[in-house]
């Protein structure tokens, strides 16, 4: 009899539950607890999820015992907030992890930037050092070059000095002109070198051979004003060629030396006196610095 | 703002004698008021979800205040209201901390993107 009464009571309670809907707070609490139980909160905030579970049990119990009661609504409210608290706290932990990861990444990026900057600085320093070395080398090379040039100039001056005994030497801008008297080199009206001339030209050849490779030479033949222009021009060219050929025979490179006949066109003294005419009969050897100017020189 | 974990915040409040299981409605009121202040301190009013629960907590505190020192029935009613106030205040605190952390993380990632753009 007693069991039947208890069963009937329980059934009525059960039926009451079935007929009275849970409060909105309880519906929310169940849904939010499920979210907490199945989401990140269960991993990050298990204690808070447990608190929510206990609170929800109390609310469910109140619903079973007195559905729709103020107690049910109150306990469901608390359970709902505790479930939401577990979820929010877990979101906070996820955000904290994200923040830590971001700070770690930022540290790495900043470190990489510092490393790159250091590397660029080191490269710039190396480059600067190399440039300084190069500059030092260039200065040394320039000094060596200057010394070599001075030595050559000194050698040239010495050579020219030895020539001054047999020829007149003068500097014209960048050129040096070696003038040999025609009387010493050739018989009158002839283009064959005298034996004495060969001795003198040997010295000239020696000097020309020692000149730097960028120098070139023009052998210019000149006559006095006696005779026709064409005769004088032809004679002067024949004499210039004779001198050129002899110098080539003595080792002066043929591509660096050429012969030109000027005839009587460029006198250096009066043709009215024997002395002046003697001076005009001459052979000049012009030493050029710039090969390109050779053709244009007058 | 450097945030401390929620569990630490709640532990500190508890250590100050402001336990969630306060003995009297007055204690519960003091506890909930402290949690509300903690939530405000981390900027709960600046974040919509946190602000909503902060306001609920404050409203419930206002309801409970005249009851905490009243009759037994009043104090019993106050205890229930304060339990809800405490639940909302704790939730507001957690939501505010979470939102602050998310914002901070977003700022750091944005800063990293800027740094990487500069490198490119």
Image: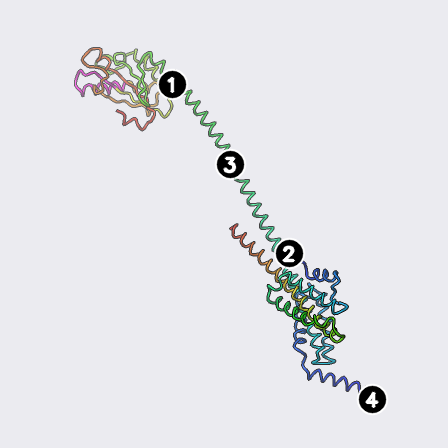
Image depth: mark 4 or mark 2 in front: 2
A7 with respect to A155 (left or right): right
Q: Real-space Cα distance between discs 4 and 2?
A: 68 Å
Residue tagged by mark 1? A156
**Depth check: A29 or B32 in front?**
B32
Q: Real-space Cα distance between discs 2 and 3?
A: 46 Å
Query: Is the C-beta separation of discs 3 and 4 under 8 Å?
Result: no
Query: Is the C-beta separation of discs 4 and 2 under 8 Å?
Result: no
**Depth check: A134 or A209 in front?**
A134
A209 with respect to B64 (left or right): left
Image depth: mark 3 or mark 4 in front: 4
Image depth: mark 2 or mark 3 in front: 2
Image depth: mark 3 or mark 1 in front: 3
Would residue A37 be seen by someone viewing this image from the given angle?
no
Q: Chain of mark 4?
A: A
Same-chain status of marks 2 and 3: no
Q: Position of residue B52 (x, y in %)?
A: 62, 69
Look at the image and give the residue range highlighted in magenta. Answer: A221-242
Quarter location, residue A82: bottom right
Q: Position of residue A203 (x, y in %)?
A: 35, 15
**Depth check: B93 or A33 in front?**
B93
Q: Is residue B47 above or below residue A264?
A: below
Quarter location, residue B63: bottom right
Task: Indicate which disc, 3 or 1, sits on the residue closer to the N terminus.
Answer: 3
Q: Position of residue A279 (x, y in %)?
A: 24, 13
Q: Chain of mark 2?
A: B
Residue tagged by mark 3? A128
Q: Is residue A136 above or below residue B36?
A: above
Secondary-structure class at tag 4? loop
The numbered disc on residue A131 is none
């Amino acid at each position: 009899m007693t069991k039947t009464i208890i069963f009937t009571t329980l059934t009525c309670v059960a039926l009451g539950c079935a007929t009275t809907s849970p409060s909105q707070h309880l519906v929310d609490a169940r849904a939010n607890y499920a979210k907490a139980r199945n989401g990140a909160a269960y991993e990050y905030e298990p204690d808070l999820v447990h608190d929510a579970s206990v609170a929800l049990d109390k609310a469910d119990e109140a619903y079973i015992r007195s559905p729709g009661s103020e107690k049910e609504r109150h306990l469901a409210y608390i359970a709902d907030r505790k479930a939401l608290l577990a979820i929010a706290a877990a979101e906070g932990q996820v955000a904290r992890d994200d923040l830590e990861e971001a700070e770690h990444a930022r540290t790495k990026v900043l470190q990489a930037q510092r490393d790159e900057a250091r590397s660029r600085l080191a490269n710039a320093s190396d480059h600067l050092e190399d440039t300084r070395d190069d500059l030092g080398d260039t200065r040394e090379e320039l000094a060596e070059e200057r010394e070599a040039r001075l030595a050559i100039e000194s050698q040239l001056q010495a050579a020219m000095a030895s020539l001054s005994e047999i020829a007149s030497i003068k500097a014209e801008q960048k050129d040096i002109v070696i003038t040999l008297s025609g009387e010493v080199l050739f018989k009158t009206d002839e283009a064959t070198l005298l034996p004495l001339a060969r001795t003198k030209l040997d010295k000239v050849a020696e000097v020309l051979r020692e000149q730097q490779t960028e120098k070139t030479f023009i052998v210019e033949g000149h006559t006095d004003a006696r005779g026709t222009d064409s005769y004088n021009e032809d004679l002067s060219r024949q004499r210039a060629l004779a001198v050129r050929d002899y110098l080539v025979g003595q080792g002066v490179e043929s591509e660096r030396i050429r012969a030109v006949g000027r005839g009587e066109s460029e006198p250096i003294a009066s043709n009215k006196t024997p002395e002046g005419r003697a001076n005009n009969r001459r052979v000049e050897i012009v030493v050029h610095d710039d090969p390109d100017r050779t053709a244009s020189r007058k | 703002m450097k945030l401390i974990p929620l569990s630490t915040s709640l532990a500190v409040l508890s250590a100050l004698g402001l336990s969630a299981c306060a003995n009297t409605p007055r204690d519960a009121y003091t506890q909930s008021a402290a949690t509300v202040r903690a939530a405000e301190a981390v900027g709960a009013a600046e974040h919509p979800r946190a602000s909503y629960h902060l306001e609920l907590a404050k409203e419930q505190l206002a309801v409970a205040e005249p009851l905490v020192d009243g009759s037994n029935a009043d104090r019993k009613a106050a205890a229930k209201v304060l339990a809800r106030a405490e639940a909302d205040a704790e939730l507001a605190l957690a939501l505010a901390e979470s939102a602050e952390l998310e914002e901070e993380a977003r700022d750091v990632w944005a800063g990293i993107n800027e740094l990487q753009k500069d490198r490119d």
